Image (cartoon, grey):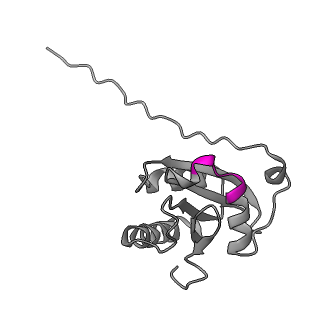
Amino acid sequence: MKKTIKPLRVAEISISYSLESNILENPQIDGSHSAYQIFQTHWSDDIEYVEEFKILLLNRANRVLGIVDISKGGVAGTVVDAKLIFGAALKANASSIILAHNHPSTNLKPSQADIDITRKLKKGGELLDVTVLDHLILTKYSYYSFADEGMI
């Protein structure tokens, strides 16, 4: 009896962009504060209740191409999948990205897990020529920048 081998099907990565006014104007990121302002205006009302992870996609001139929601978790964490992050960045032809997640606890101090994932994603980006410029930890009223603190 002969077995028939069926070809594997691979799902295509799809990216959708938010067509809100400040994204259409392609603002330029000139530091952590401008990135924080963009993330803050596009964060859900759950910023104080549920941890989320997003990325800002940038072109070579550090102009915003879009924001991608990577994951939404619980009160104390969310899953960060490097394949989803770099799949989105490559699909959008981004030259660089800025990572961001919120801490519902309002504690801005990065956890060891935050530090580890930042290092992992920075190394992954180097392999793919997608520069990880910063990783922001957000709360409703403030932020922490890995780049500003010399941690990236």
> Is 105 placed left or right of 43 in the picture?
left
Q: Residue at x 49, y 53 (%)?
A: 51
Q: Residue at x 42, y 68 (%)?
A: 120
> Is 13 placed left or right of 17 in the picture?
left
Question: Of residues 55 and 62, which is closer to you in this image?
Answer: 55
Give the residue furthest to the top: 1
Q: Quadrant of residue 33?
A: bottom right
Give the residue furthest to the bottom: 150
Q: Is residue 92 magenta-colored?
A: no
Q: Quadrant of residue 28?
A: bottom right
Q: Is residue 43 magenta-colored?
A: yes
Q: Residue at x 61, y 65 (%)?
A: 98
Question: Of residues 142 and 99, which is closer to you in this image?
Answer: 142
* Labels in figure, total: 0
Magenta range is 40-46
* Residue 55 position within the rendered picture, expressed as x and y whole percent measured from the top left: 59, 57
Q: Residue at x 38, y 67 (%)?
A: 113
